[in-house]
Amino acid sequence: MLLLTAFLDTSVILSGLHSPSGRSAMLFRAATKKKVKLITTPLVLAEAAEYIAKLSIQPLQLEELFTASILTIIPNPPEITAEKFKTLTTDPDDVHVLAGAALSGATVLLSLDKKHIITPRVKLALRPMKVLSPKEFWRWIMRGNIKLF
């Protein structure tokens, strides 16, 4: 069985750290058990680092995600690649997320941003990659589309 891969944006990482019982945190537990490979970029982690204090998250919690091999960090997308994704979202700060996800080769892009990332336009452009929220991801798994456990 192939390992399922998921690219995480900042919102999912922060949600997983802030709410240990939530669906985003379930991703971290699945990755710890090697049931799913979670991928992100240094730019996404830098964004997360900017917001952790506002959410009362300890910096060590973020650091632990990659020191414990929960997250696989791939290089940031080249600027020329990111440019190709500018027309897909109204938020220029999300372009690097779309480019990183596309370059990652992941099965799914996970985000909580329904306004800029989980949109029909982005879903169409990134196909065959799925673009889902963590809640939608776990529903997809439970429907039997993918066997994780």
Image (spheres, helix red, strand yellow):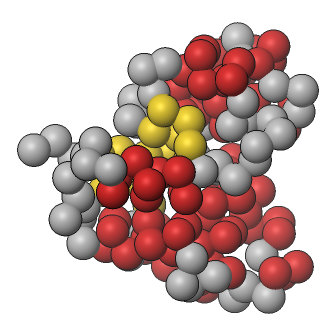
Does residue 52 appear left or right of residue 73 in this picture?
Answer: right
The residue lying toward the viewer, choosing from 142 and 78, is 142
Does residue 60 appear left or right of residue 6 in this picture?
Answer: right
Figure label count: 0
The answer to whether one can see residue 59 in this image is: no
Q: Residue at x 33, y 57 (%)?
A: 142
Q: Residue at x 53, y 51 (%)?
A: 136
Residue sticking out furthest to the left: 1
Q: Which quadrant is the C terminus positioned in?
A: bottom left
The residue lying toward the viewer, choosing from 25 and 103, is 25
Residue 98's x, y, as percent?
A: 65, 30
Q: Residue at x 16, y 41 (%)?
A: 2
Does residue 87 appear left or right of residue 2 in this picture?
Answer: right
State the image quarter where residue 85 is shown: top right
State the image quarter where residue 117 is shown: top right
Residue 122's x, y, as percent?
A: 67, 23
